[in-house]
Image (cartoon, grey):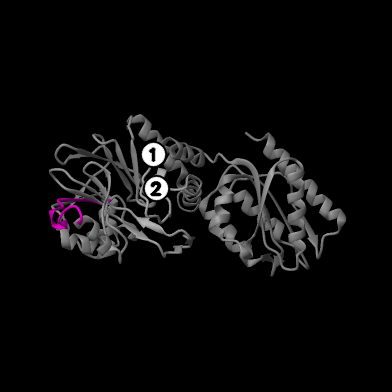
Amino acid sequence: MEAVKIKEGFYWVGAIDWNVRNFHGYSTFKGTTYNSYLLIDKKITLFDTVKHGFEEELLSRIKSIINPKKIDYLIVNHIEPDHAGGFLKIVEIIKPEKIFITQRGKDGLKKYLHKNDFPFEEVSTGKEIKIGEKTIRFIETPMIHWPDSMISYIPEEKILVSQDAFGAHYATSNRFDDEVDYCTLIEESAKYYANIVLPYSPRVQNLLKTIKELGLEIELICPDHGVVWRKHINEIIQLYENWSNYIAEKRAVIIYDTMWKSTEKMAYAIMDGIIKEGVEARLFKLSVSDITDVMTEVMLAKGLVLGSPTLNNGLMPTVASFVHYMKGLRPRNKIGAAFGSYGWSGESVKLLNDILNEIKAEIVHEGIKVKFAPDKDTLKQCEELGKIIAQKIKSSS
């Protein structure tokens, strides 16, 4: 397997995982990559390793450029096992002179590996190392998306090695953003942000502010997953600005499940009302939808409408599972409403409103609940609710 030249003296030497379909609950239908980069200078430097099981692919690509034992430095930007799972085997082979890592990264690796005999050198924001003609500058990015995280910047080459920031779970034999379908790339980038990075949006804002304040000139963004950004850098940075500020598109997403079609009939009536007001609506039945894709739609849509029947004084399990997942990802700045049917106790609408309150949504209606099945009058109320939601979306900033 061959390395890919990113720039003179700088190579992608990572691994492609064509077959992974689940990444700790996140659906990865397009696979992923575990990116590692090799910088050739007086001190040859490797940025990150790969997931355990992909070490030979990494070594094969390195060998297409140099003997791996000639590597002097290893930089560990992030210790999550998809990047550092191969750490032990790679370190045993290359025997680096120094391993640059944050203090939290060092402590974390010790707890993972239960070993302490590594040539760690702690770095923090502002620390620079000279490796010959080139410099590597470190910027800590805690909670983007682990406490140990940092990014590395090579000023002479204007390269930002961004670890998980600006990434996507997207397996491809192409290495650059202008070599793949742009729409697919943006969809996968949004999915990645919504399901991994979204809870840490205030930290993303801090990172973007730091990049501006330091005046970093960036010609290449090299993340730990997906492709290298070289053409659409401004676009992905702007999208991160929007997503981290919870700026959404003026459309609505209706998320529900149903037992005997009553809640489903209500969902369709609400959708009709939204559409009649000239606002786009997207409908997701959770029993046949992937929650990772649904969560992406939540992030991208201004309106969030949740529906569930009442089951055992609670929510239908598919709905309960999704809202628990969604709540942990902390979407904000939504216009919300709830609906549902019931046979006996009817708690679902209240429980969904509680969820909307927890994510600090603006609830525009107390919600609609119906016993057993909706009649024409109830469906008309649902349509009117859809219109109220759409009007709120249109008038929102």
Q: Is residue 252 left or right of residue 372?
A: left
Magenta segment: does it hold 366? no
In terms of secondary structure, where does tag 2 sit? loop
Residue at the (59%, 42%) spot, across then down: 333
Can residue 388 be seen by looking at this rendering?
yes
The one of 17 and 241 positioned closer to us in this rendering = 17
Lower position in the chain sequence, tag 1 or tag 2? 2
Q: Report the residue marked by disc 1.
A: 207
x then y, percent, for residue 8? 23, 41
Q: Report the residue marked by disc 2.
A: 144
For the residues labelled 1 and 2, the Cα–Cα distance comes to 9 Å
The kind of residue tagged 1 is Leu
Q: Is residue 216 left or right of residue 43?
A: right
x then y, percent, for residue 385? 76, 47
Q: Are marks 1 and 2 in contact (CB under 8 Å)?
A: yes
**Magenta part of the protein: which range?**
64-76
Please state, as top left, top right, bottom left or bottom right, where the C terminus lies in the image.
top right
Q: Residues within 10 Å of mark 2 (few under 14, many from 20)?
A: many
Residue at the (32%, 51%) spot, across then down: 148
x then y, percent, for residue 11? 25, 48
The one of 198 and 37 positioned closer to us in this rendering = 37
**112 to 302, vertically: above or below:** below
The quadrant holding residue 219 is: top left
Magenta segment: does it hold 67? yes
The kind of residue tagged 2 is Ile
The quadrant holding residue 107 is: bottom left
Number of numbered discs overlaid on the protein picture: 2
**366 to 30, vertically: above or below:** above
Q: Is residue 361 left or right of residue 269?
A: left
